[in-house]
Image (cartoon, grey):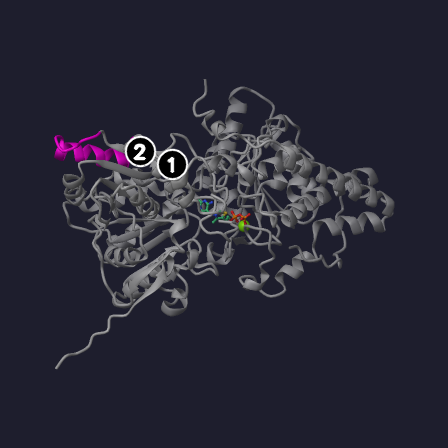
Amino acid sequence: MIKNVVSMTTQYPCNNSLVSDGSALTDIFRRLLRIRRIEEAIAVRYLEWNMRCPMHLSIGQEAIPVGISMHLTDKDHVFSSHRSHGHYLAKGGDLKGMVAELYGKETGCCGGRGGSMHLVDLKVGFIGSTPIVGGTVPLAVGNAWSASLKNIDRVSVIYFGDGCFEEGVLHESMNFASLYKLPVIFVCENNGYSVYTQLKERQPNRKISGIAKSHGLSVHKGDGNDVLGIASIADKAINSARNGEGPQFLEFQTYRWLEHCGQNDDDDLEYRPRRELLTWKNKCPIERLKTHIVEQCLVTEQQIDLIEHDIKTEISNAFEFASNSPEPSPAQMRNHIYAS
Amino acid sequence: MHRNITRKIRKISYSKAIREGIDQVMQESSNLVVIGEGVPDPKSIFLTTEGLREKYGKKRVFDMPLAENGMTGICIGAAIDGTRVLMIHQRIDFALLAMDQIINNAAKWHYMFDGQMTVPIVIRVIIGRGWGQGPQHSQGLQALFAHIPGLKVIMPATAKDAKGMMITALRDNNPVIFIEHRWLHHIEDDVPEEVYGSDIDKAQVIRRGSDVTIVASSLMVMESLKVAKVLSEIDIDMEVVDLRSVRPIDINTIMQSVVKTKKIIVVDAAWKAGGIAGEIVAQVVDNGFDLLERAPLRISLPEHPVPTSHYMADYYYQDAKEIAEQVMEFFGYQGNKESIFDLLNTGYHRDVPTKNFHGPF
Ligand SMILES: Cc1ncc(C[n+]2csc(CCOP(=O)(O)OP(=O)(O)O)c2C)c(N)n1
Ligand SMILES: [Mg+2]
């Protein structure tokens, strides 16, 4: 279960042109909140044991895909890994298809074959997420390579974690992307942990971004809980990639609130320093934006209530859709072994 | 004067047995190190490495960067230099990233340098299943490893073997792939407390019978034993051979059984094409072409990946019920099959190893 968020938030320090655009900010707020509420609903309903698959929730990390997706179109392509709900939803992935997928239903985004760790929505350019760490990184580079071979105006985005940065294939992929100046955006969501293991137990004391830079990528670093900061970095990086300036490497510091896999708060296991989680909860990306827009009178409480209400309705509709959807028949598992 | 040696035997789980085996060899050889993603973490690889870091320290028990291929090579390099290594992957699927190092280096170093060096490494890999593990977290890849000369590939089924075979593997001077099934971890068995090694190149008759030889490995041994028990009530007397090692395959033990039963069924939780079941059948035919009274039967998985959704995956696996059905078919049994199936019904959901399992993995 998710414990209540302490609503003592940090001030919004962004000097971005967006800061005073009320309707734009309200929209960003809605996008963030929507992902949060969806994952909270999943966490609560997971305990009914009808979503029978491993679940890696991204609560606390929502700002990154929201800030990035603002600058992508449906024609741009996104790849991801095990923790992909936020990436999928921010890109516009169909909520009903996702929830039905978690329930293993026929109407799921891959017909029940994938579950939480294998999302897809081709209509909006979400090409796929898979759970072998690093597995999709070269695919995103190949996607960008193909776009450049075909002269298509498109950027490819690959989301991965700090743990993935250790995989050889990531470095091979950066090398090739850089060699051919491919329009690919590497997004490293650095939450400081791989499962229970801290970054410093796995990587020496040097900068992740420094390595990407040495591979010849343009490097951008930011606060992964500052959605407006992320948006402005993404704007710049995505434009550069579109303009043929080659691969971009974005590294954002953030924090996972719940356990690595599952719906629990596992802070009692003490693999994270005391109060670390609390510190990060105080940097909640959603509360932060909310405080800003409320204090600047860019949004009213009624508007926020309305947003909450709409999201709630959308979520309950999606769960209802999933529950009422037909189960795939066992015979369906034999489809699509080979393409025709 | 008689000295009463009381050999203590008690029931412990497969995962505890593995832990005990590792612990005992770490005590006897100070140059054995243990490494893997999550080895010292709070979940300690399904409790199989629990407390080892505390006991042996940070210079012998390691967590690992997410770098399966490079780290496997690094471990091989250390092993060539005489540091004995136990490397652990939480899923067999993750070891796929390291196939180059395993096949091109570990399996060949001793051979290609004319026996001048050895590679004493054990790589533990765990086959996942259920709770939506899906296509990339639950593959039965034993044949892939068993194909490679230079590797020893073992699949202990019981807690007693898990410990004894772990000890032998860790003392061996060759690369050993130690394949576990996630659904065996909780199963208890009589396990001696003492340090003992068990053969890692021998099959074992685990249940005597006269009508048919069932060769099975890992979790399928447990499923086959359930079937044997139930089918004995309709006078089908199965002899169950626990394969234990998939490279080498102990054809002698299998043939001794087949000479008696004149029939062979192989149960292998993997794909049939190019698989272990086919290899065993081929070796049986090679060795006893005239013996067989019936065409051999292979019970394997459907020739496609497993989908995540339990609505489909529940029909993918070949467990006791499916095995019983095929064995009855094999014998042309005409009686009431439903009553047999009832006996094999676990009464809980098919995508979990135990009634109260709720994931996440
Ligand atoms: C090749 C491979 N090795 C190990 C795993 C097990 N595993 C799944 S997620 C994960 C942690 C990944 O950490 P990170 O990349 O930082 O992403 P995060 O979970 O923090 O979002 C691990 C080790 C895997 N799925 N694939
Ligand atoms: Mg991480």
* Magenta residues (range): B274-294
- Toward the viewer: A129 or A3? A3
**Label 1 element class:** helix
The correct choice, above or below, for B25 with respect to A256 in the image is below
Letter of the chain that mark 1 sits on in the rendering: B
* Viewer can see residue A91: no
Q: What is the quadrant of residue A112 in the picture?
A: top right
In the rendered picture of this protein, how many numbered marks are placed on residues?
A: 2
Name the residue that disc number 1 marks: B337
- Magenta span main SS: helix
Residue A44 lies in the magenta stretch: no
Spot the residue most to the top: A340
Name the residue that disc number 2 marks: B333
Letter of the chain that mark 2 sits on in the rendering: B
Image location (x, y in percent) of residue A34: 71, 42
Q: Are marks 2 and 1 in contact (CB under 8 Å)?
A: yes
- Toward the viewer: A95 or B234? B234
Image location (x, y in percent) of residue B77: 29, 51
The correct choice, above or below, for A124 with respect to A15 in the image is above
The correct choice, above or below, for A161 with respect to B189 in the image is above
Q: What is the quadrant of residue B332 in the picture?
A: top left
Residue B293 lies in the magenta stretch: yes
Q: What is the quadrant of residue A274 in the picture?
A: bottom right
* C-alpha separation, residue under disc 2 versus residue under disc 1: 8 Å
Q: Quadrant of the N terminus of chain A?
A: bottom right
Give the residue type at disc 1.
Lys
Q: Quadrant of the C terminus of chain A?
A: top left
